[in-house]
Amino acid sequence: MSSKGNSRPPLRETVVSNTSQFDLLGLLRNLWDFRLLLWVFCKRDLKGRYTQTIFGLGWVILTPLITVGVFVIVFGLMVKVPTDGLPTIMFYLVAVIPWYAFMNVLNPSVQMIEGNAGLISKVYFPRLLIGGSYAVGAAVDFLIAYAFLITPFAIAYGVWTLQLLLLMPLLLGCTLMIGLGVGLMLAPLNAKYRDIKHLVPLALQLFYYSTPAIYPVSAVPSWAKPWYSVNPLSLVITSYRDAMHGEWPAQSTLLTLIAIAVVCFTVGVLIFQHFEKNVVDTL
């Protein structure tokens, strides 16, 4: 009897290499093969954040708007922090919204292994896709806030410029690369030592106050200014503020920012890939 009628397509075999050598082409091929999982994770994360909420995606607008409102009242009206000639609300909007994008990719990335332990320990897939989904989600939140907060207010206050539009993709990409890169560095460590997830918020709080989110760089004493020339979030925020003045950021500013983003992301991927092979044993 012929077995042609019962023939099945050959099963696909996934081989997990145990070599410690980094294979870029193999990684890219692997990510491409599992690319549909990225959208599955993105959909899952968005549903998890906004399902059963009254305002839903409206929180993407309300959260930075409320924060900026507090800053305007406290630092603008009461303390009267200088804003370098920019409208107070715009001065804080272009700081708060990029900062939220940075946090929205960094915080979940640090806990991506611990938070997905049940899935990671049962089935193989490129774990980088989980971090990638956080970056996509943070980008969606940022673009919504940019479209419905930064752009309308910039037009209303007369500070919308072509530079503000053209610089946005570069600055957003660098912000996400830095946040994801740092998250990938810390994720394997957090899987083994759960203290990391408690230390990260404290470190972010210190980092926030050393970033010119609520004050201008011009108010920083001269001895501290070298830090602000290498602080990536400082470079992002000051670039947005320069753009609203109708000026392009200095070439050195953009080159430094791009270099930091590339280094952070590359080192993060390398570290994560190195420890990924043994991560199941730590869960």
Image (cartoon, helix red, strand yellow):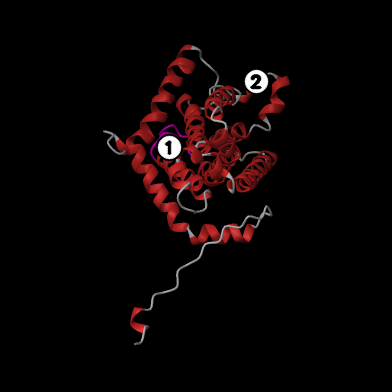
In the image, taking residue 259 as reference, residue 236 lies left or right, namely: left
Mark sitting on residue 155: 1
Q: Identify the mark nearer the N-term, 1 or 2.
A: 1
Q: Main secondary structure of the magenta part?
A: helix
Q: Quadrant of residue 196?
A: top right
In the image, taking residue 48 as reference, residue 184 lies left or right, namely: right
Secondary structure category for the residue under label 2: loop
From the viewer's side, name the closer residue of 30 and 243: 30
- The answer to if 273 sits in the magenta stretch is no
In the image, taking residue 209 as reference, residue 158 lies left or right, namely: left
Q: Amino acid at mark 2?
A: Val
Residue 274 x %, y %: 64, 47
Residue 76 x %, y %: 48, 18
Q: Amino acid at mark 1?
A: Ile
Reading the image, the residue beneath label 2 is 220
Residue bounds of the magenta highlight: 148-161
